[in-house]
Image (cartoon, rainbow, N blue to C red):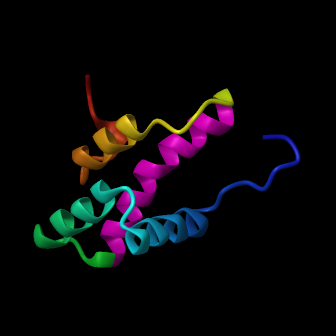
Amino acid sequence: MQNEEIMTGDMLVKIVENQLTDGNPVKVKETLMRLVMSGSPREEAVQMIACALSIEVFDVAKNEGTFDLKRYSENLTALPDMPWEVED
């Protein structure tokens, strides 16, 4: 990521909030509802979702690839376990 703005945690949270507002992807809203219903405060749940999003943002930036919606959805499903904590 040369000469590009580095994505901050606040930016990731804003993207998640936009995804929730837009209802796209639907999995984000489903994940938020699941996490809140299981006892996570909304703000914490949104931050967890932003962590899952960060995996995709990092991969796109590092490998100049494309956003992998399938992997993002899998990481959302794994929450509240963080994507880097999930063992294969």
Residue 70 lies, in percent from the top left, at 36, 36
Residue 25 lies, in percent from the top left, at 37, 56
Residue 23 or 39: which is nearer the viewer? 23
Quadrant of the rendering where the C terminus is positioned: top left
Q: What's the residue at 39%, 43% (across, down)? A: 72
Which residue is at the far left? 38
Q: How many marks?
A: 0
Q: Quadrant of residue 8?
A: bottom right
Q: Main secondary structure of the magenta part?
A: helix
Residue 20 lies, in percent from the top left, at 38, 70
In the rendered image, the vertical position of residue 85 relative to residue 13, given as above or below = above
Residue 56 lies, in percent from the top left, at 51, 41
Instruction: Specify whether residue 45 is painted magenta.
Output: yes
Q: What's the residue at 33%, 71% (across, down)? A: 44
Q: In the drawing, does residue 66 fall left or right of residue 62? A: left
| Bounds of the magenta segment | 43-62
